[in-house]
Image: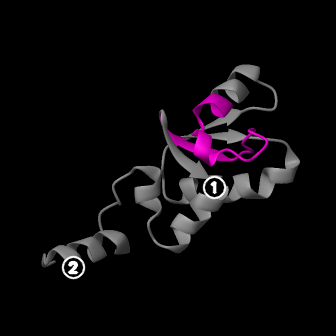
Amino acid sequence: MLFFLFPTQIKKKQQEVVGFLEANKIDFQQMDIAGDEDNRKWMRENVPGEKKPQNGIPLPPQIFNEERYCGDFESFFSAKEENIIYSFLGLAPPPGTKMLEQQSVLRGEKK
């Protein structure tokens, strides 16, 4: 899991993403785009065109699972609120989670 860092005005959003990933024991790597031109260039090139703002420069945090673009903070927040965060991140829900139980019920499986 990768996501990109930016100076202080976006710090709160970054902290929310990091807090969630740490609390759920999801391995991740933070990429500093403020001090690393290569990271900044990679992020800008790998955010899909339809997800970029009008000025063409996406602001962090931008979330990737390896090379797969997951979304920005607003998408992350919505996925958390809708209980589809693991799907958003491209991960299988951990055993015993509410999401996994709901999927089993929908398929007609018994516990």
User: Residue 105: which disc?
Assistant: 2
Could you tell me the amino acid type at mark 2? Val
Q: Nearer the viewer, residue 15 or 79?
A: 79
**Numbered disc 2: secondary structure:** helix
Residue 106 falls left or right of residue 50: left
Circle 2: is it few (<14), some (14-19), or many (20+) Cα within 10 Å? Answer: few
**Numbered disc 1: secondary structure:** helix
Q: Is residue 33 on the magenta stretch?
A: no
**What's the distance in space between the residues labelled 2 and 1, CA to CA?**
29 Å
Residue 96 figure quarter: bottom left
User: What's the residue at 57%, 50% (across, down)?
Assistant: 71
User: Residue 17: which disc?
Assistant: 1
Q: Residue 1: in sight, yes or no?
A: no
User: Residue 68: which disc?
Assistant: none
Residue 46 figure quarter: top right
What's the magenta region? 43-66
Could you tell me the amino acid type at mark 1? Val
Q: Nearer the viewer, residue 26 or 100?
A: 100
Above-or-below relation of 21 to 36: below
Q: Position of residue 91 (x, y in %)?
A: 38, 51
Q: Position of residue 59 (x, y in %)?
A: 75, 44
User: What's the residue at 73%, 57% (across, down)?
Assistant: 13
